[in-house]
Image (cartoon, rainbow, N blue to C red):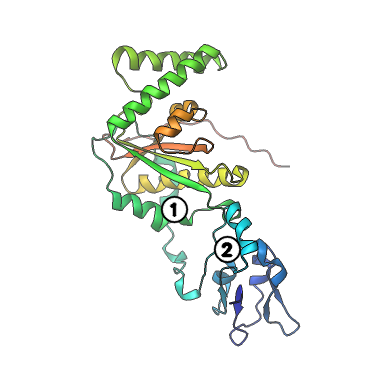
Amino acid sequence: MEHLLINTELCNGCGFCVPDCPMGIVALNNKKKAIHVAENEEICLYCGHCVTVCPVHAIELNPITDESKLSWIRQYGVIPLSLKPEECLKANRDKFPEVGKLENVIRSRRMTRSFLPKLVEHDLVEHIFNDVLRFTPTGHNIRGFGVKIIEGRDKLNTLTDMTIASMKEIVKANILHKFDQETYKRIIAAWEDHGINRIFRTAQEILVLHIRKDINDVLTGPATFSMLTYFEMLCNSMGLGTTYAGYFMGAAGSSDDIKQYMGIPAGDKLTGSMMFGYPAIYYHLVPKRPEIKITYI
């Protein structure tokens, strides 16, 4: 089956698909009909723009069948798929949130530091990721990252012990800014002397994103950052709380022991971690923040 199937009877010659294909796989012939440029198909990103931009549903995308091309496409992290117009969700732009509501979500969301002793239901987690977040932006449509959910205080306490051990080595090396150096010392003392967990606070679970070692993290890294941003906004809209697990990330990124405990391959790169769950408190005010200086050139 051809990589792109174009129904020339339906094609109205609008040409929207031509500039919207980032890899030049679609062109218009002299009859103003869309045609498949076969020599460029081996760099198809499977973004599906050609299918979704067509107003008359004349284009269908199919997986490349040449195995010699597929091997390095898969290795790059692009997932070949079939995409027919009838398989697509409708883009309901009329259901976008009012701008004032979206502005309020951005301003009012806070980093939650107190959580209820309750796990988020698995079906809700699956909905967040597979019904929503899999549609967030990705560089070159690369899907070379993994999602780990670490559940339960026992596991998080074990990760706290491992993080504290790593933080001790970092403090000993004296490679941090003085502010962070002193912060690390106090976090270590709080846990070891008083049992106060300032790594994961009272969270019951965390999200960890990691990139496969054979994937280009220059492209995939920003995609995971974007996903975490959308995750935070979506969770806050659902009444869940979130906060970045920054101290954990600072220690875990270079620790193969921590990766092994979480079932993450040693060569993979950790790109983000976030605590999430049902908040025990809510914030009633929006704190002041310094204005952003904008320079126009």
Say what secondary structure mark 2 lies in: loop
Task: Return the disc, 1 or 2, that comes first in the chain's sequence.
Answer: 2
Residue type pointed to by label 2 = Tyr
Mark 1 neighbour class, 10 Å CA radius: few under 14, some 14 to 19, many 20 or more: some
Q: In front: 101, or 38?
A: 38
Q: Is 154 positioned to the left or the right of 242 in the image?
A: left
Q: Nearer the viewer, mark 1 or mark 2?
A: 2
**Residue position for label 2:** 46
Q: Residue at x 51, y 17 (%)?
A: 170
The circle drawn on residue 133 is 1
Left or right: residue 229 compared with residue 25: left
At a point 61% along the width and 72% down the height, the residue shown is 3
The residue drawn where x is 51% and y is 70% is 83
Judged from the image, the secondary structure of the residue bearing numbered disc 1 is helix
Residue 121 x/y as whole percent: 27, 48
Q: Position of residue 136 (x, y in %)?
A: 49, 53
Quarter of the view holding residue 273: top left
The answer to whether residue 44 of the structure is visible from this angle is no
